Image (cartoon, rainbow, N blue to C red):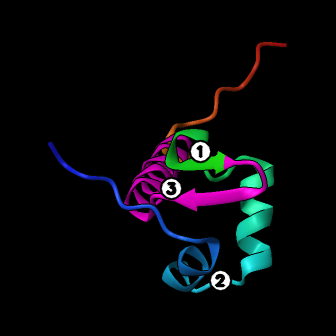
């Protein structure tokens, strides 16, 4: 069984090279998926590995969607 490591918001910000306020913004806007963190009261702990995986897969999906040819509607 693999053990998940959870860290404070500052460690997430440092890992991604962003500010803590940007990390909070990503959290509240849903860019950081719910399954990648634990919330107890006002305290959050994050699994950086899971966040990176989620953001990477989301980026790959977005790039695949942008590669699809756009269809012209019939007039």
Image-based side of 57 in relation to 65, left or right: left
Q: Residue furthest left?
A: 1
Instruction: Tell me which segment is drawn in magenta.
Output: 40-65
Q: How far is disc 2 from disc 3 in space, using C-alphas? A: 14 Å
Q: Residue furthest front?
A: 41
Instruction: Give residue 16's position: percent from left, percent from top.
Output: 53, 78
Q: How far is disc 1 from disc 2 in space, using C-alphas? A: 17 Å
Identify the residue at horizontal 49%, vertical 81% (top origin): 15
Instruction: Give residue 40's position: percent from left, percent from top.
Output: 67, 48
Q: Which residue is mark 3?
A: 55
Identify the residue at horizontal 65%, vertical 26% (top origin): 71
- Secondary structure, mark 2, is loop
Q: How far is disc 1 from disc 3 in space, using C-alphas? A: 9 Å
Identify the residue at horizontal 65%, vertical 48% (top origin): 39
Closer to us: 74 or 58: 58
Identify the residue at horizontal 19%, vertical 48% (top origin): 2
Residue 33, numbered label: 1
Q: Which residue is mark 2?
A: 18
Closer to us: 31 or 36: 36
- Secondary structure, mark 1, is loop
Q: Residue furthest right?
A: 75
């Amino acid at each position: 069984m693999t053990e998940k490591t959870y860290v404070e918001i500052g460690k997430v910000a440092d890992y991604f090279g962003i500010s803590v306020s940007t990390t909070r913004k990503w959290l509240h806007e849903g860019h950081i998926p719910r399954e990648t963190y634990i919330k107890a009261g006002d305290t959050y702990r994050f699994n950086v590995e899971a966040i990176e995986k989620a953001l990477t897969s989301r980026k790959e999906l977005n790039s695949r969607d942008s590669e699809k040819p756009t269809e012209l509607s019939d007039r």
